[in-house]
Image: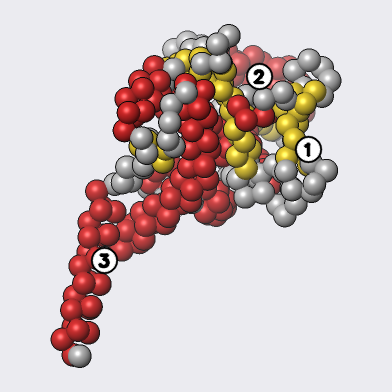
């Protein structure tokens, strides 16, 4: 943060660095981290400035959305904030201490849309594939055998077929339940087959990748950030990095008004003059290099235009 009044800078920095956050953390970074996570997960984020008895900023609090209700004001534009913590809706006494942000809200809607909107259907199919694959491996991976005894054509063998089948079953069960390797010895026409050996497990690689591609496209993140080692060219990786940078810049534009409101309110509560502006660090060194190249090319083009004149 950069204050327009130099005398207020040090006091604001000390406050933002040491202020209590949710009772378990310190510093504005913890508050913004939870605020941003809530924004992406639920589409709407809410925060509150807690003051002490003298009105001095005491803590930042990430408010649960189930404790708040947003209603349209009678003028059709402004938003009234109601608290549901007491069991009934009560209008907040100091709405200037509440910070609300919405991610891509629908026209006329007060709440935003989660980054994960539209993914439950895709995720449900993906979970079905994973569950089915696990079930198939549980059935086929834990080998089951079919032992078939075929009595001969003579009358004696057929007469004792039941007893001999029970004896074969007993010996086979003893061989399979043994802790050590044990041979199974039998006399007669006996066939042993693995149950399901002819069954082929459906290939899940292609459908799983197609579903994961939908999820990755929705998040806007490069696949390698999610641990997906998909083959890609160097140029494609560069374009993915550029897309990620644009995505982060869009999120910064949503967070900037909330952070500015938070810090400006803290300045007013502390009785300090001036306002403040949010200064973001460059996302990565590669972005700085690309920006420098773009400025160089623009300067060279401008120089050529002036020489032609």
Secondary structure beneath label 1: strand
How far apart marks 1 and 3 lie (CA) works out to 46 Å
Mark 2, Cα crowd under 10 Å, few <14 / some 14-19 / many 20+, is: some
Mark 1, Cα crowd under 10 Å, few <14 / some 14-19 / many 20+, is: some
Which quarter of the picture shows residue 234? bottom left
Going by the image, does 38 lie left or right of 246? Answer: right
Image quarter hosting the C terminus: bottom left
Secondary structure beneath label 3: helix
Mark 1 or mark 2: which is in front? 1
Mark 3, Cα crowd under 10 Å, few <14 / some 14-19 / many 20+, is: few
Going by the image, does 196 lie left or right of 5? Answer: right
Q: Residue at x 49, y 33 (%)?
A: 264
Q: Residue at x 70, y 52 (%)?
A: 106
The outermost residue toward the bottom is 309
Residue sitting nearer the eye, 250 or 175: 250
Point out the tag, 1 or 3, that comes first from the N-terminus.
1
Query: Dot 1 corresponds to which residue?
Result: 71
Would residue 39 be seen by someone viewing this image from the given angle?
yes
Residue sitting nearer the eye, 143 or 86: 86
How far apart marks 1 and 2 lie (CA) works out to 73 Å
Compared to residue 105, the image places residue 7 above or below, namely above
Point out the tag, 2 or 3, that comes first from the N-terminus.
2
Mark 2 or mark 3: which is in front? 3
Query: Dot 3 corresponds to which residue?
Result: 294
Residue 26 % position (x, y): 42, 17
Going by the image, does 159 lie left or right of 2? Answer: right
Residue 287 % position (x, y): 29, 54
Query: Dot 2 corresponds to which residue?
Result: 169
How far apart marks 2 and 3 lie (CA) works out to 80 Å
How is the structure coloured here?
A: secondary structure
Going by the image, does 221 lie left or right of 234? Answer: right
Secondary structure beneath label 2: helix
């Amino acid at each position: 943060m950069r204050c327009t009044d130099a005398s207020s800078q040090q006091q604001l920095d000390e406050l933002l660095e040491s202020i209590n956050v949710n009772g378990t953390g310190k510093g504005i970074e913890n508050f913004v981290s939870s605020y941003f996570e809530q924004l992406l997960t639920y589409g709407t984020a809410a925060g509150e400035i807690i003051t002490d008895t003298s009105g001095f900023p005491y803590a930042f609090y990430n408010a649960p959305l189930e404790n708040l209700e947003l209603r349209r004001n009678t003028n059709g534009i402004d938003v009234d904030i109601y608290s549901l913590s007491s069991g009934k809706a009560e209008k907040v006494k100091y709405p200037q201490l509440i910070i609300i942000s919405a991610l891509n809200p629908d026209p006329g809607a007060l709440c935003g849309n989660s980054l994960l909107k539209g993914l439950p259907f895709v995720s449900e199919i993906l979970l079905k594939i994973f569950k089915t694959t696990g079930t198939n491996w549980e059935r086929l991976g834990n080998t089951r055998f079919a032992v078939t005894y075929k009595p001969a054509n003579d009358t004696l063998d057929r007469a004792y077929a039941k007893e001999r089948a029970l004896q074969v079953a007993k010996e086979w069960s003893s061989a399979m339940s043994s802790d050590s390797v044990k041979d199974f010895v039998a006399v007669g026409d006996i066939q042993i087959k693995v149950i399901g050996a002819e069954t082929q497990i459906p290939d899940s690689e292609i459908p799983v990748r197609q579903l994961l591609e939908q999820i990755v496209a929705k998040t806007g993140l490069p696949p390698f950030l999610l641990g997906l080692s998909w083959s890609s060219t160097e140029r494609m990786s560069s374009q993915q990095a550029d897309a990620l940078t644009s995505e982060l810049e869009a999120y910064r534009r949503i967070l900037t008004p909330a952070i500015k409101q938070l810090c400006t309110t803290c300045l007013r509560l502390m009785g300090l003059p001036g306002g403040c502006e949010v200064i973001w660090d460059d996302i990565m060194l590669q972005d700085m290099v690309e920006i420098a190249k773009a400025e160089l090319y623009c300067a060279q083009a401008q120089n050529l235009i002036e020489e032609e004149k």
